[in-house]
Image (cartoon, rainbow, N blue to C red):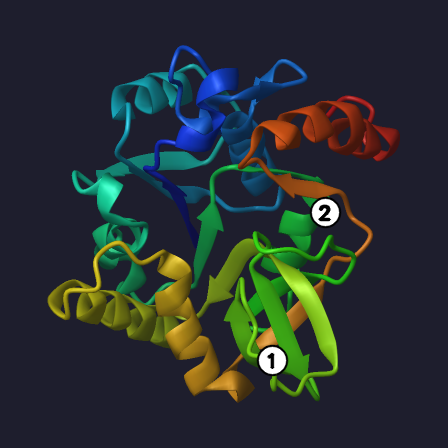
Amino acid sequence: MHAIILAAGRGNRLADFNPDGRPKCLLEFGGRSLLARQLDNLFQAGVRHVTLVVGYEADLIIDHVGTLSSRPEVAFVYNPAYLKGSVLSLLAAKEIMTSGETVLVLDADVLYHPRIMQTLVESPNPNCYLIDRDFAAGDEPVKIALHEGKMVEFRKALPADLEFDTLGESVGFFKFNGEIAAEISGTCSGYNTDGLLGAPHEEALRDVLLAMPSAFACEDVTGLPWLEVDFPEDIERAIKEILPAIREDIADF
């Protein structure tokens, strides 16, 4: 199993709370960066190989990883076009996506309970995604809509006439077997050649997820604390709510 962490973006929306311009994955909560916690969670879940897709301030990320112990083996792939959308970051990891291995595709800017990663890694389903049904509705959450257990939509905005019986927020973590990973990589290549640069990688995932919904399973992590750090208010919530909630269960987190 090989994890791909997408960490190339800049995080402009946090500029006022990050005056030194660090990549978002290097923001610290409780004395440890999001990236350090991510790598530790992967290691504890048994994942030993990670590829980090970097772009903005890549050297800072590479240097930071070098200071960490008890982590998976980490390789780096540079996406020079990191300003043009995360679909190119996932495409930059094509070698791993087409290797035939089981692949995890992970956002880098999430503070989360380690059991969330364990749920993904240990799922008996070779292709799966995570859903949290307890979420604040709004324009920003990437929503997963299910009907009879199958995904029918995966976007921030849902069609008004969409038929579904379960709705939740995507955690931004996925597991794919070698066949599906290669299919997704090919879809990313299509975005590149079709002039769809600027698209988030979720759009390429969506194309494959909706084309073959029966190939995927959903793992429900509702009740476990997590937060994607995107906005200034997320920093306060991470400090005051998410980190303490995790530490109620894991004191030394």
Q: Residue type at mark 2: give it.
A: Arg
Give the image location of residue 55, x and y in percent.
26, 34
Residue reaching furthest to the top: 20
Give the image location of residue 229, x and y in percent.
57, 35
Q: Residues within 10 Å of mark 1 (few under 14, many from 20)?
A: few
Identity of the residue drawn at 40% across and 19% down: 22
Q: Quadrant of the N terminus?
A: bottom left
Q: Quadrant of the C terminus?
A: top right
Q: CA distance from mark 2 to mark 1?
A: 34 Å
Label 2: element kind: helix
Give the image location of residue 29, x and y in percent.
63, 20
Examine the image and state in which quarter residue 203 appears. bottom left
Label 1: element kind: loop
Q: Nearer the viewer, mark 2 or mark 1?
A: 1
Residue 160, numbered label: 1
Regarding residue 231, the answer to whether it shows in the image is yes
Q: Does residue 91 appear to the left or right of 122 in the view shown?
A: left
Which of pointers 2 and 1 lies earlier in the amino acid sequence?
A: 2
Residue reaching furthest to the left: 193
Say if 252 sits above or below 149 in the image.
above
Q: Residue type at mark 1: give it.
A: Ala
Which residue bears the numbered disc 2? Answer: 115
Identity of the residue drawn at 58% across and 56% down: 139
Say if 206 sits above or below 237 in the image.
below
Identity of the residue drawn at 33% across and 18% down: 60
**Relative depth, front residue between 52 and 10:** 10
Q: Residues within 10 Å of mark 2 (few under 14, many from 20)?
A: some
